[in-house]
Image (cartoon, rainbow, N blue to C red):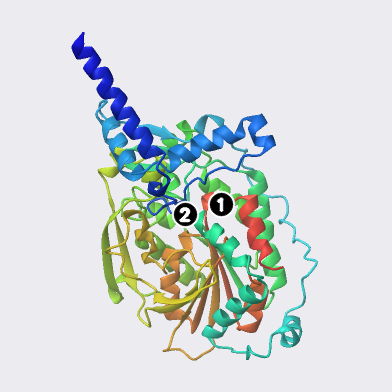
Amino acid sequence: MRGVQIVAVAAALIATVLLGIGLALPLRPTYSASEKRALASFPTATTETLLSGAYFTDLATWFSDTFPCRETLLSLGAKLESLYGPQGESFYGNRSTAVADTIPETAESLAPVMTLAAAEPEGAADEANASATPSSLAHDKSATGALDQYAALVETNADGTLKEKKAEKAEVNGEQAGSIYVTNHRGYEIYYYNQGGAVKYASMINTYRARFPKCEVYDILVPNSFGVELDRSTQAALGSSNMEDAFNYIYSMIDPEVHKVSVFETLLQHKNEYIYFHTDHHWTGLGAYYAYMRFCDAKGIEPHSLRDYQKESFDGFYGTFYFSTNRSEALKQNPDTVEAWLPIATNEMEYINQLGEQGHAQVINDVTNSNAGDKYSAFIHGDNPLTVIHNPHRSDGSACVLIKESYGNAFAPYLVDHYEDVYVVDYRHFEGSIAQLIEEYGVQDIIFLNNVMALSERASGMMMGLLG
């Protein structure tokens, strides 16, 4: 009996200590570097949230999400779960509630060009901006000039609160995967086709084509690892939509004048190579290279061989699949290596981050000592609103803009050798006018690169918003 009492007292003491640690506000983390996201903030009590119970739900979320030593505890929890038995197939996310639309075989007509109330003919923006630009900003046609003007835009449109808002936006910039299937120590994100997203994406591309008739527009749709590495029968059994059919339908809605860079078959041919990460939703530098080869075919230029580049490798990468599965032990046993090939002409770049601050970095930067969850930032220093790469070995005025989400990071380095200036715009964070950038800096090629999970109405709306 006494032994039971001792155990009970010990358990009570441990619980008290843990509660004390949990309530220790100075020890609570506010940001997860591994997951690249801000953790839940302490909720504000209002009459509405107290009566509805939302306050207490948010309080519980804050308590668990910001518990001291959460990274260590989550890793220990995953390790404990692995002791339950052999790790086979696993599912994470809301797979049971996901609904996919039926993919039509082909479009009866092209997707409509959207009406832009603020749209102007090419060249009109130059005159308007000449009077609107502050005299302290001498018009600079150089690549650095684009950064200066964007920084000025951020500052002149701010009243002191903008930077605070941008800081909040930066903190919630974690990329979370949806329904994840884990098998053979690899993660895969299940794809569900959305008709509204497909039509709006095609319409957005057609609108850019109509808005910039003097530019060449390229569209690169990229499948994820689920659509390439798993056989069709497995995909169907898991309820996934057919990505290749989805891409073909979207392409059938896009203006024939747009260069449709189809990479699906190419990636399938290389599916047994290291073209996708195991613990992350991105493709690798090698996967992006094969897409670069197809882009060169479409543009009519000669691609470089991988042998022409200097290669860098960074071990110990754990990506979004690993953290979205609460640090799956199966994935932990299969860490990734980030392989990158340095541009030949230059490895230097300039960028503006999500706080509106200018910086200098390398196109392929050393992430040897970076957090295990942040090594994909080896490519163009991560997801910045605007990145500018100037090739000092070209003086032909050639320029392109790459409009992308994070898949484009691994693709951008291959463009450097083929243009005098490369502008990389992350549409999720860019707050300027893409029309002004294209017109003022003589952009000839507009390149869209999006992975299959970005084919949504929201994403297309954000890309359309850049024209405003």
Instruction: Using the rendered view, name the quadrant where residue 8 is placed.
Output: top left
Q: Is residue 433 left or right of residue 80?
A: right
Indicate which disc, 1 or 2, sits on the residue closer to the N terminus.
1
| Quarter the N terminus occupies | top left
The image shows residue 375 at horizontal and vertical percentages of 34, 60
Out of 190 and 376, give the one closest to the viewer.
376
Q: Amino acid at mark 1?
A: Phe
The disc placed on residue 264 is 2
Q: Is residue 287 above or below residue 105?
A: below
Identify the residue shown where x is 64% and y is 56%: 460
The disc placed on residue 247 is 1
Badge 2 element:
helix
Out of 44 and 196, give the one closest to the viewer.
44
Badge 1 element:
helix
Q: Is residue 128 above or below residue 113?
A: below
Q: Amino acid at mark 2?
A: Phe
The disc placed on residue 329 is none
The image shows residue 427 at horizontal and vertical percentages of 58, 63
The residue carrying pointer 1 sits among few (fewer than 14), some (14 to 19) or many (20 or more) residues within 10 Å by Cα, namely many
The image shows residue 438 at horizontal and vertical percentages of 63, 77
Q: Is residue 79 left or right of residue 269?
A: left
Q: Residue furthest toward the right?
A: 117
